[in-house]
Image: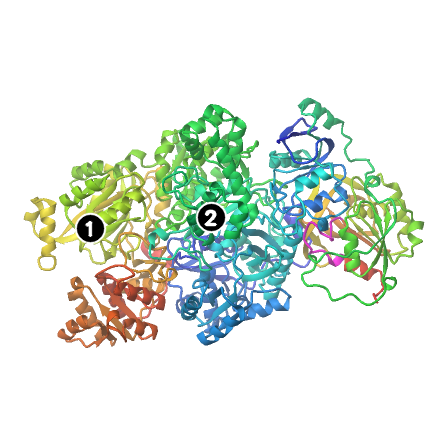
Amino acid sequence: MNCIAAKAFNHDRAVPRRDDIHRILIIGSGPIVIGQACEFDYSGTQACKALREEGYEVILVNSNPATIMTDPSTADRTYIEPLTWEMVAKVIEAERPDALLPTLGGQTALNLAIALEKHGVLEKHGVEMIGANADVIDKAESRERFKQAMAKIGLEVCRGKTIQNIDDAREWVKDIGLPAVVRPSFTMGGSGSAIAYNRQEYDELVRRGLDQSPTNEVLIEQSIIGWKEFEMEVMRDVDDNVVIICAIENFDPMGVHTGDSITVAPAQTLSDKEYQRMRDASLAVIREIGVETGGSNIQFAIHPQTGQMIVIEMNPRVSRSSALASKATGFPIAKIAAKLAVGYLLHELPNDITRKTTACFEPTIDYVVTKIPRFAFEKFPEADDTLTTQMKSVGETMAIGSTFKESFQKALRGLEVGSFGFGCDGTDLWGTDRQPTEEEIKEKLSRPGPQRVWYLRYALKSGMTPARIYELTNIDPWFLDNLAEIVETEERIRSVGGWDDLSPDLLRTAKRQGFSDRQLAIMLSSTQIEVRQRRIDLGIVATFKSVDTCAAEFEAYTPYYYSTYETEDEIPSKQIRAESRESRARILDPLPGSPLSKPESRPLTVMILGGGPNRIGQGIEFDYCCCHASFAMRELGIESVMVNSNPETVSTDYDTSDLLFFEPLTVEDVLNICDRVEPDGVIVQFGGQTPLNLARALKSAGVPIIGTSVEAIEAAEDREKFQQLLERLDLKQPANGIARTMDQARRVATKIGYPLLVRPSFVLGGRAMEICYDQQQLEKFTAEAFVVAQGQPVLLDRFLEGATEVDVDAICDGRDVIVPGIMEHIEEAGIHSGDSACAIPPYSLPGPVVKEIREATAALARELKVVGLMNVQFAVRWEESDELLGASIEARESEINSNLESRISRPVLYVIEVNPRASRTVPFVAKATGMPVAKIAAKVMAGVSLAEQGITEDPVPSHVSVKESVLPFIKFAGVDIVLGPEMRSTGEVMGISPRFSMAFAKSQLAAGTVLPIEGNVFVSVADRGKPQAIDLARRLHEMGYSLLATEGTARVLSDAGIPSQPVKKIREGHPNLLDYLANDDVALVMNTPRGKGARTDEGKIRAAAVQAGVPCLTTIEAATAAIAALEALREEEMQVEALQDRFETVSR
Amino acid sequence: MVQPAKLALEDGTVYIGTSIGADGEVDGEVCFNTSMTGYQEILTDPSYRGQIVTMTYPQIGNYGVNEADSESGHPHLAGFVVREHSRIESNFRSESSLAEYLKKWGVVAIESIDTRALVRRIRSQGAMRGVLSTTDLNDASLVAKAQASPGLVGRDLVREVMPSQPTDWSESVSDWTHLNAKSAGSSSTPNDLPHVVALDYGMKWNIPRHLVDQGCRVTVLPGTSTAAEVLALNPDGVFLSNGPGDPEPLDYAIGTIQDLLGKQPIFGICLGHQLLSLACGAKTFKMKFGHRGANQPVHHLGNGSVEITSQNHGFAVDEASLPSDLEVTHRSLNDGTIEGVRHLGVAAFSVQYHPEASAGPHDSHYLFQQFFDSMGVTAG
């Protein structure tokens, strides 16, 4: 029987889906922030596809250009606009949707939907909320109402109380005692939630929580720290059929936010009796809250010694956990949720994986899934890295194995933090002179932090018993015993003399427990390649199994695989795969000149290596590129094979590629896949630094890398080769040098002079990159860079002060070059390009400079023989006169620095960096120009030239697009927010308008910076920016803002005839700016740094501004753009426009 | 000490692993169960008599075993196959490790084989006879023994697992069954309650527990009892239990049911469902590899809803053979096979799946209420 027969049971339902609605609005989740990452691109994209498949017109609003969902082909009408209810109301006014589906865009979409409802927008335009209505959302999210609902169905909740002021809070804590959990209401990712252990902490957390909550409420609860934590993913249809998709057990017990916990699917330590009770409770919760259709996530705490069950919370929407559950089981929660929202019943929808069965069942899995979060505390050294109920991780990796041991070790190597499993991989401290003491181990175990997982191993190595570890961590003994078993195997391997004494049985046991070749090589004093060869000779090879939702009960039709060391492999041979693809290739209309017409040069199979877990500097932008590479291959009729380990992404959706491998991105794991899949080409350009770091080893192992050669990639990174190349092309670069030792660094510094920029090579995201103004700073930062560089040299560049930075993305097929994106940065050089706002087209550079940039880009691409994408960073500086050109760089620099403001005359172009790969800006360029840059580049790499693709001219955008970065400072209280060469942003937004100033205004609004229309503006600027600052202050004054300034600045302003109100510096006493911020008396802060760091007065002001939600402009350039934006906002209202209309303009 | 063990199939496939249970050799039909929890309930389910059960979920034994979760006095299955047995058990309810339990009851069990490969083989080839041994490790010998194994068809396995004596059943369901504790029972004496006679063909204990929970007085009779013996107890209703193997050879049970039809309301589960259907004139057939798991969706044709059910059956009622007085009430959403029938003339209904769950979801508890209501007596 199939699903068609299943439908026949349903006598009354000729048309199962709703035909009274036609146009559906979907709201995305906006920029990537901590707590809301690309899982909502995945869910939103699935929903768009699912609804369009049913013939609905889909209108999408999202401010994040780096998403697949905002590709103009994903929805019918796409609005890249700020996610405020006012802007969404404009979209509603323009598009008149019949329904709003708010449950697929995270907390952002839910909050917006509630705001739209509250402001009467939905009622006014007759828009129906589907999936979950405003009352349901409120019932699930309002702590009080949720508590009442749970009481009604007899479920326990944590004892807690919603509190509006500090006095009540002090009363309540007498009742429940400490520790207590403080949770601000209606914040996303548990933002602001924390545990108070003493009175002082308690008061502080309550105050901050009241401020952060949009409703000025906090929930204060009894602590259930240390209890076991579980999550249930539940789906319900309009007929009240409810199924559980997945049960997830947290390795880290209660007290650590689930997003920061290692989590495991399915639940491991519940007997059927306990599991079924939790299932019953989940069903009761979703019914009582009244989520009509779709997915929800319910969290439970279980007392480990009594089994007492407490409901923690419920999310009436798809979530990060539902993305994880979808990838863990193969069940596409978001897609099904979208279809249920338009009236389908679960059993009317087919299970895509089995084809024979329906979506109304509970997936059962025959493997173990482990998710491990990835943190970025190295970027925020001032932040507290204790893990609490507020989420702090920036990404996650997931791994699948036959056992927990295997999936856990795979996940650790998929984390890409330099480890290749549970220690013994050459990066751990055990056995080194930094081996932790027992005290250190105890401290790290009892305080959950990002390093705790490694200290669990140290504890076991030190002989600490699992029982003692349990006392310190409350991690379930079952997990601890599995870790102990891994360590025992490690010790067995170490105890054999070497290869010749290692039995094949022990080797096989180790591989089955997830040990990597790298770990084995280190323990056996061998090399990774030798281990690989020897185990292959012994027949110990990875086998690939399907993720099929049903534990093999039915045949699977979706080729979604994971590796494990078993006996049977399920991947069809290349020949069989090619035959089954033939039919599809014929259906597609190949582009003229595609490799399909040249069979001899046609690759059959192309593998795309993804970017692994999200981190700062490498995230959704690269996943976007990888997805486009896959789409391009499929358009060409080439089999596309995706390898990635990030469960949040579109790239790991089972229908993005022909074959999907959910695997860590290491040389070993990729080679194992190549052994089975036999790719004719592997794309390493699109997944960020992760696959590039594998390129050399893969090539040496004989893997065919396509596109720009590995040699060319290395040439761009190799200082000397690159310098020679620039000389050949007559291009300039800032004076620079390489250092492998501190001594060398000092010598280079003496030669090129200060200020200079220090950075480790082969590292993305400006990790440990700093500007040094003197030798003391040089030594400090260089020492840090050496640590990060891990044996690679450190690069030193003369820093070009006052220069304008330009980012360029280009495509080259080896002969022709297209330059789709020339982006002028708004912040000056010295701020990481990933943190800087930028505009397409350039808003201030003269035409000839733009032309020169274009030509230089083309010359670089041709010279490097780029095939595919290339990104170049230029700096443009207005410099003195021709006669200086002949002088040494040092002489020129010193001359210019001393005359910076008086004698500027001519723009000079410097090449800062060339990267022959996809860059972070590729999706932004695509959205700004309408040109599918990544897809075109992927086709070039597969052998279809630009000319053959009909791409002959650079796109000319009709609008100005501004990209703005979104920074996570709100999650790291007290951290200084001044930008620098190290990237710290997590995401980006885009503002589009015919005018630069308005596009900038929209980008700020989209980034959550509400530029104030009136109020007090605090002005404090470094001396260097004073002249520009005076002009800006005058304009603010003329617009009617009141100015606040510290004494010195106030005097300067007064001299210029601008009135201002003096404010004390913090050390001068009260009232100082912190008091104004606390009293909501400041609407905008303009503070450019003299010094950096959270301990400086300025740092405190900036950090306080962020916590108070007051926009803070930290560069003169940003302030200039912002003030122009304020002026623009006075002249006209923000308009919304669909991408589809805009690109039509382009093509005309 | 690592004790090697082998599992051989009649098609010649041999899997090499490690023993986690008793030493010895067993033969039987090799089947698989897709439940991720509930291994103890599966081990003690008498319906697995004659079968070597493979768990598709790879980590088994994690939460140990305890007395309360047993579905009968001891394991009845022939052998047990898992991917990895947990070295420790971690659960506050655990009383012993799974390995100790298996050894205590003499269950031959193997771990560390590619269970998914085995399951895929059974799925594509159909259920197969096999031998599981720790004593004979010769492949050819094992395969020959597998081929000589009698299989399930035509065998009466009920007599091997049913009780020999009638008993009164008084135990109710565990506290884990209902989310909210039921209000305290009525003050009526047991004699006021409707009396159910349960014919035990290898009954899971959670069934009489549910009947008690529903407010019935329960007497359990051996599955070989006659209609006269049943009626002599003056029941208000008769329950037909689950049990192992092929229903067709069970003439005595079919005869008893034929004699009882129309006398008192009848409710059957699993084998009881097949026997009721056979008694009404339908036929049963052996399925390719059956339904065994806790995620089986069943369409309730009466109201259109879907129940997620616990199932364990390798035989099913043949729809083409269904007499006109039997109406299909439930159907498998996965393959359309019959999951429930109702007699149009007399009070009798049955389901192929396990509303008593254990292991499995509680979606179908309403059937006990339905049976209670069909008896037409109100408690108290």
Residue A776 badge? 1
Quadrant showing the C terminus of chain A: bottom left
The answer to which image quadrant residue B129 occupies is top right
Number of other residues with Cα within 10 Å of mark 1, as a class: few under 14, some 14 to 19, many 20 or more: few
Q: Nearer the viewer, residue A340 or A618?
A: A618
- Which amino acid, by three-letter code, is at mark 1? Gln
Which residue carries the number 2 mark? A372
Q: Residue at the spot x=52%, y=71% of the render?
A: A161
What percent of the width, then of the height, locates residue A1045?
A: 22, 72
What percent of the width, then of the height, locates residue B105?
A: 74, 39
For the view shown, which residue lies furthest in the left direction? A883
Which element type, helix, strand or loop, lies under badge 2? strand
- Which amino acid, by three-letter code, is at mark 2? Ile
In the rendered structure, does residue B366 fall within the stretch colored magenta?
A: yes
Which element type, helix, strand or loop, lies under badge 1? helix
- Judged by its main secondary structure, the magenta piece is loop
Q: Is residue A582 visible?
A: no
The answer to which image quadrant residue A837 occupies is bottom left
In the rendered structure, does residue B132 fall within the stretch colored magenta?
A: no
What percent of the width, then of the height, locates residue A109?
A: 46, 63
Chain part drawn in magenta: B352-367
Give the vertical position of B243 relative to B141 (above or below).
Answer: below
Quadrant showing the N terminus of chain A: top right
